[in-house]
Amino acid sequence: MTSLTGKNSIAGQWSAQGDETFTSVDPRTKQPGDVQFHNATKAEIDHAVNEAAAAFQETRHYPASKLADFLDTAAEEIEKLREELVETADYETGLGSPRLPGELTRTTSQLKAFASLLREGSYVDAIIDTAMPDRQPAPRPDLRRMLIPIGPVAVFSASNFPFAFATAGGDTASAFAAGCPVIVKGHPGHPATTELFTVALNNAVKACDFPAGFFSMVQGNGVEVGQNLVQHPLLEAVGFTGSLRGGRALYDSAAQRPRPIPVYAEMGSVNPFVIMPGAIEARGDSLVDTLVGSATLGAGQFCTNPGLVLILESDATQDFIQRYTAAMQAKQPEVMLNASIESGLARAVEQTVGAGGVDLLTGGEVVDGGGFCYAHTVMQTNSTTFRSNPKLHEEHFGPVTLFITCPTLDDLRLTLNTLEGQLTGTIQAEADEVEAARPVAEALRERVGRLIWNGVPTGVEVVYSQQHGGPYPATTAPGTTSVGMTAIKRFMRPLAYQSIPSPLLPDALKDENPLGILRIVNNEYTREPIQS
């Protein structure tokens, strides 16, 4: 077993300069752990970012193959600690099996997928417009454009995905793949898990002979550590997954710097879930099971949890809601991640029920069972009430469903139009309802990053076509994704080379195309070299 230090890792060296400490907490028993973890000091953060900036002067020139080898090595080092990681994360989060083993596989698979992306090479988006010296009325210069790494990146770990959105998760993997050094801010809910991942990544840095500053990790259970990190003048970008409050605070802090930097914050969503009448009639029972399963997955602690269900008023609708409520009551609640999430959910539900015009059908209370736990909760209101009170639009981060009944499809569409940006929008319908659902789909399209037909929003595939993002406040950067291969582009910037001699050009832009990558040359996609 790995001996935990409780320290920060600054360019491969363990450090504990500060006196402020905290412990992890077992969510099943509420008992604190034995290891004291040290909050990073401003001096430690300064050292980490300076080392990252120094490392970038080297890694920015690394070929894609070298970065790919590092990602594969990181995955191997993580797998060596698989059993220990799963056991430790289970203690700190209560997420258990099969969730944690599967999530760990997703985490190492992400690293390997980015390695494959790098070896293929076309991710740099090389575009070449060759010179036209005889063009009239003015000659055209030779212009060549590609993406290059942006520089040191801060990654903030998420509470609800201690593997896939944490120390070695998607933000870190995509930043590494871009060639950017990373400073991870560990989540205080799983600091021991964070330290174990740090051991694995430090081992990968050493094994691949990368500069030590390519990776650092800082711990902290207050806002100061994160704010000090974001405000460091040598930091170039931030990746964040968490609450609207936390993401907005980091975004504002970065914007107020003398030199603002991008913050790619994914901040949650209510994920509207529309059920058409034909779907209830044809498969109401299976829809109850499907929706309950999605809404309670991981104790409802998914950013893609279908928290808002819009449905047309009818006797069949009321019967469906009653069956759904009974199914939620019958299912045993799961332990929640920590005290903050439990208390935050309790406040959110209390606010919704107290807003007026909302019926609490079941739940709405903390479950007293020794650990952090909240009852499966179902609420109902009508579209008029919902549209008139923006407070009802806010996320309930947990196993909570709010039904919105609408008199007509047009009213349902109008209700969707009052929503802010979301990660996902779902339509459950039958084949003969496609045209009737078109206005609903069009309304959702303007507000979501992923539109789903006859599926559920929970479960996000790590593939090239994935879009895990959406208009604000779902994210601060709706043109990007935090899941899938194109996530790498958050941590790269375009650079155009005008009339630059061939010896000074990167391989991706040279006439001979030594990398054999797909490029746009004079408006056509090709892998062929440019003929003189």
Image: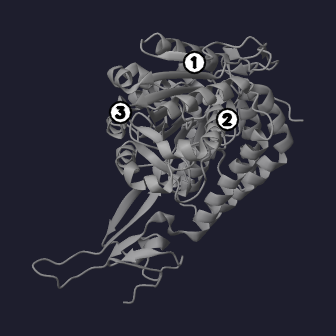
Report the residue marked by disc 2.
Answer: 297
Could one spot residue 300 in this view of the protein? Answer: yes
62 versus 200 height, above or below: below
315 versus 110 height, above or below: above
Circle 2 SS class: helix
Looking at the rendered image, the disc whose residue lies closer to the viewer, 1 or 3, is 1
Give the quadrant of residue 21.
Answer: top right
Instruction: Name which residue type carries label 3.
Output: Thr
Residue 415 is labelled as 3
Could you tell me how far apart the alpha carbons at marks 2 and 3 are, in whole angstroms? 26 Å
Q: How is the image coloured?
A: one colour
Circle 3 SS class: helix
Give the quadrant of residue 443.
Answer: top left
Which residue sits furthest left?
Answer: 137
Could one spot residue 399 in this view of the protein? Answer: no
N-term mark: 1 or 3 = 1
Report the residue marked by disc 1.
Answer: 361
Circles 1 and 3: CB distance less than 8 Å? no
Image point 61% across, 52% down: which residue? 461
Image point 39% across, 40% down: which residue? 471
Q: Is residue 178 left or right of residue 16?
A: left
Crowdedness near tag 1: few (<14), some (14–19) or many (≥20) residues, C-alpha within 10 Å: some
Give the quadrant of residue 337.
Answer: top right
